[in-house]
């Protein structure tokens, strides 16, 4: 039974502790848009998106007004364009990206994801065209997000693509250098990418998904931190229980919004992603949750253990609140989007090596990390390879979103605004991995992939 205290507590979560629904994301299949003529394909894509998502933003706004739950973003994900556009006779998919951008602006969403390729085991012609198109596509659009899945536990790591991704990131940075390489903030490199992720920049509509679907991402780092503030001196079992209970309540709010959006739009409900997604605002930080457990600063010894407890407890609590939990679900550790992470990098308690260790137990990976503009493509590829290896061997999703800012050096700070926040330039190991990356080929799948 829901009590008055439950209602008041939920109200406090929203008004005081920054609980929100971070995104309602409509996934849209573009498989029925295929056409050998690029212009006709683009027209089909535009028509499908604008018709399918015509009322998405208004529905989100109506639910927000009626229930008092902040819904920060309304987004769209589409079938990976490397698949949907492959029938086209085209040398570049930049016109497709520009079509996605126009459609997203027409329906009023914040971002559209799916300028993507799935190449963990090799390339098709469409994959190659898409990857080559990414730098120009991200430079010439505002709302389009891109991703590449280049590794999986079942297939291993496509090291040819790892090498190419370092170069793609560098080209994207150069083409958006007038905006502090913001194009790179819209590009995610994955291992074991989920096909129902509602969060950008890595969202795409998987090939096994229905024609249309509603996925919702919730967030509430401030709510979790508040729950721990009353547990000074408590043991870790008590902390885990408190996080589980809080995650349950957060997820129920998301479930309500998802079901309402699904009903009103006449689109099937897919999943709730119960990730703790921080923002640059004070009081909305994952790093501060870890410090609330007793760490002097995020990055101190014990940080990875604290994050492991947090991530696991969030998943356990959320799983009891919804029958359809998916996406990434857990704790995000982006640097530029988390006020506590930014502070930790500034004070020197948090390094990229410690962040890499933390990715072994978090939901995603090395996220929104700005590095000096002269960091080589091979070094970027080496970081991607390390992160992919963590994902492949541990059978979990990992990802990399690195931003090499042209002209920037360690000690500088780059500002992006909004949810992208700001970031100090993070030092990177300068020893070369160029000969390693140049080998190419594929790192075989680990023995744990043999599960049939």
Image (cartoon, rainbow, N blue to C red):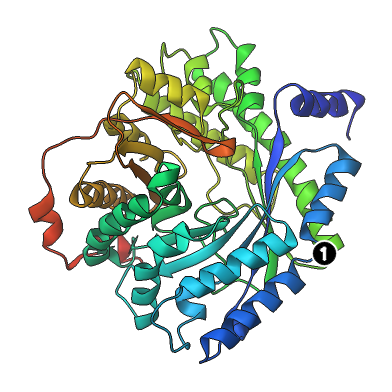
Q: Where residue 375 sits: x, y (%)?
A: 22, 42
Image-quadrant location for residue 350: top left
Front residue (pair 366, 243)? 366
Horizontal arrangement in the rendering, residue 429 relative to residue 97 (left or right): left
Above-or-below relation of 59 to 309:
below
**Quarter of the image that includes the N terminus:** top right
Secondary element at tag 1? helix
Q: Nearer the viewer, residue 444 or 233?
A: 444
Q: Judge from the rendering whether residue 244 lies leftward or rightward of residue 202; answer left or right.
A: right
In this view, the residue in front, 173 or 386, is: 173
Residue 219 shows in this picture: yes
Query: Is 164 on the left or on the right of 295, as rendered?
Result: left
Residue reaching furthest to the top: 233
Q: Residue at x 49, y 22 (%)?
A: 340
Q: Residues within 10 Å of mark 1 (few under 14, many from 20)?
A: some
At a point 27% along the width and 65% down the height, the residue shown is 161
| Residue lying furthest left | 435
State the image coordinates of residue 162 (x, y, percent, origin top left): 26, 59
Q: Front-most of 247 and 73?
A: 73
Quadrant for the C terminus in the image: bottom left
Q: Residue at 53% of width from left, 22% of height from top?
A: 289
x and y percent of residue 10 in the render? 80, 29
Is residue 206 at all visible to an observer of this figure? no
Tell me which corner region of the image, top left, top right, bottom left or bottom right, holds residue 218.
top right
Q: Which residue is mark 1?
A: 265
Q: Residue at x 31, y 37 (%)?
A: 371
Q: Residue lying furthest bottom in this view?
A: 36
Q: How many marks?
A: 1
């Amino acid at each position: 039974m829901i009590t008055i205290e439950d209602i008041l507590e939920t109200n406090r979560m929203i008004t005081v502790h920054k609980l929100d629904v971070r995104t309602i994301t409509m996934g849209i299949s573009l498989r029925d848009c295929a056409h050998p003529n690029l212009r006709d394909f683009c027209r089909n894509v535009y028509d499908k998106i604008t018709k399918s998502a015509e009322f998405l933003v208004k529905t989100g706004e109506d639910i927000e007004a009626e229930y008092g739950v902040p819904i920060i973003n309304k987004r769209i994900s589409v079938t990976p364009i490397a698949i949907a556009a492959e029938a086209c006779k085209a040398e570049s998919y930049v016109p497709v990206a520009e079509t996605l951008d126009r459609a997203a602006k027409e329906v009023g969403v914040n971002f559209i994801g799916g300028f993507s390729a799935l190449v963990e085991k090799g390339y098709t012609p469409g994959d190659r065209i898409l990857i080559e198109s990414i730098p120009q596509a991200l430079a010439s659009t505002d709302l389009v997000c891109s991703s590449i899945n280049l590794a999986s536990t079942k297939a291993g790591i496509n090291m040819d693509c790892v090498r190419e991704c370092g170069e793609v990131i560098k080209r994207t940075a150069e083409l958006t250098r007038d905006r502090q390489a913001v194009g790179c903030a819209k590009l995610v490199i994955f291992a074991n990418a989920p096909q129902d992720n509602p969060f950008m920049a890595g969202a795409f509509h998987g090939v096994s998904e229905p024609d249309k679907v509603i996925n919702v991402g919730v967030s509430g780092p401030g709510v979790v931190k508040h729950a721990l503030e009353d547990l000074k001196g408590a043991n870790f079992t008590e902390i885990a229980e408190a996080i589980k209970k809080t995650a349950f309540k957060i997820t129920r709010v998301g479930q309500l919004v998802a079901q309402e959006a699904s009903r009103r739009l006449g689109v099937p409900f897919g999943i709730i992603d119960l990730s703790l997604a921080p923002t640059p605002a004070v009081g909305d930080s994952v790093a501060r949750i870890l410090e609330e457990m007793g760490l002097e600063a995020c990055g101190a010894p014990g940080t990875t253990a604290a994050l492991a407890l947090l991530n696991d407890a969030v998943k356990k609590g959320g799983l009891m609140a919804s029958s359809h939990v998916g996406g990434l679900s857990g704790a995000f550790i982006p640097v530029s989007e988390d006020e506590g992470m930014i502070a930790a990098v500034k004070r020197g308690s948090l390094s990229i090596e410690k962040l890499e260790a933390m990715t072994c137990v978090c939901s995603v990976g090395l996220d929104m990390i700005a590095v000096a503009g002269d960091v080589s493509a091979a070094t970027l590829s080496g970081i991607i390879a390390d992160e992919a290896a963590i994902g492949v061997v541990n059978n979990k999703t990992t990802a990399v979103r690195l931003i090499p800012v042209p002209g920037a050096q360690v000690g500088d700070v780059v500002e992006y605004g909004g949810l992208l926040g700001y970031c100090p330039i993070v030092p990177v190991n300068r020893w070369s991995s160029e000969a390693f990356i140049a080998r190419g080929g594929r790192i075989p799948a680990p023995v744990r992939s043999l599960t049939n």
